[in-house]
Amino acid sequence: MTASAFAFDVQDRLDGTLGRTGIMTTPHGEIRTPAFTPVGTKATVKAVLPESMRDLGAQVILANAYHLYLQPGADIVEAAGGLAAFMGWHGPTITDSGGFQVLSLGVGFKKILAMDARSVRSDDVIAEGKDRLAHVDDDGVTFKSHLDGSMHRFTPEVSMRVQHQIGADIMFAFDECTTLLNTREYQEMSVERTRLWAERCVTEHARLTEEQPDRPYQALFAVVQGAQYEDLRRASARGLAALKVDGFGIGGALEKESLGTIVRWVCEELPEGRPRHLLGIGDPTDVFTAVENGADTFDCVAPSRNARNGTVYHRDKRFHLTNGSYRRDFTPIDDSCDCYTCANYTRSYVHHLYRAKEMVASTLATIHNERYIVRLIDRIRTSIGDGTYWELRDEVLGRDTQA
């Protein structure tokens, strides 16, 4: 299958902004954008069956190459027929490159940090009782598994081979993820290193694609870095836009207050006809900001993670369902929500499940939280098309608070 199996067509535009709607075509189906991508790190959205994710309206699932490489092994996913078949999803799938996890889980720092002698001192940021377990050089990263302590080596070529085995419809080029703790000098080196790694990913991806002509085509997205520096973000975007990639990720270190500005810098440099995925964003306020500045798709673990911790979303506020005030509350989590949980269960019941430490509490709350975000972005997409975006934005952001 050729690159024609992947396509992106811009549909409607949000006047006065970089926002747009589109249709992304993959071998496993279409993704209508803007779209939220629930995170199924280990080939599962925690606590929820794949068929439940389909029922709540998810279009695509993102899994993680680092985790699947370590367990069960990319070769097992490949033998199962690829990620979608392995997890029983049968829709579009994405894998991120593993770069973020290599550095965050393997490094042992308080915050994700890739360093050399020209960066901040390692003893400023290593967490108590932790060792530095990931070492970055121009060729790749050597790291220790967070599961069993075994040593591994990821390079752009290894990341491509692993992701080809996993077989997602969209995969990301291997990149170096820095943080705001890194010096300006290190950020400059990292942006160039990420560009050179992306070039190697393009070469290896082309080779592997040619070797396996009978397999569905896998789209390759390159990741824009540069922290909060405008010149670095724009340079990174221009450098990656010149490569033969199918789309782009926007990742790396940024502060919430700068999100819209940084996304705009990047999207102003990227070609119109290729999709842009914003990595690790899912808060409603951030989603509106990102859409207006040109992002097409988003992924975030927050809906499922919050659910496991007892926090649920509501049109007016987020609240902690474990609080005693919900013990005798026989209303739905959100009576405006159309999810399975809100149609069939009360706050009182789910509160009881949390207090009783029943696992199904996480299942019911995750179904609700994921549906809340998926539905919100569906509404954003519709509102861009019918001209009601700003009214929707004012309605949602005027009500959404943190309890």
Image: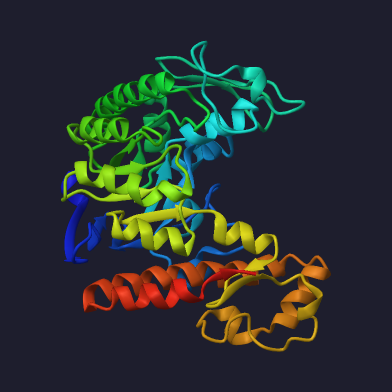
Front residue of 377 and 229: 229
Would you place residue 336 above or below residue 86 in this image? Answer: below
Query: Residue 191 sits in which quadrant?
Result: top left
User: In this image, 389 relative to 335: left or right?
Assistant: left
Res 45 seen here: yes
* Direction bottom: furthest residue: 330
Residue at image position (28%, 78%) is 388
Residue at x-position 65% and y-position 32%: 110
Closer to us: 345 or 372: 372
Q: Residue at x 79, y 86 (%)?
A: 328
Which residue occupies 80% across, 81% down? 327
For the image, the number of numbered tags is 0
Q: What percent of the width, then of the height, locates residue 250?
A: 35, 43
Left or right position of 130 against 395: right
User: Is residue 91 at least partly visible in the picture?
Assistant: no
Q: Where residue 231 sits: x, y (%)?
A: 28, 31
- The quarter of the displayed image where residue 14 is located: bottom left
Is 192 placed left or right of 73 in the picture?
left
Compared to residue 341, the image places residue 36 above or below, namely above
**Colour mapping:** rainbow
Q: In this view, does 311 lie above or below 250?
A: below
Residue 262: percent from left, percent from top: 34, 44
Q: In which quarter of the image is the N terminus?
A: top left
Q: In this view, does 75 lie to the left or right of 127?
A: left
From the top left corner, tell me how far across and down residue 223 is, in percent.
34, 37
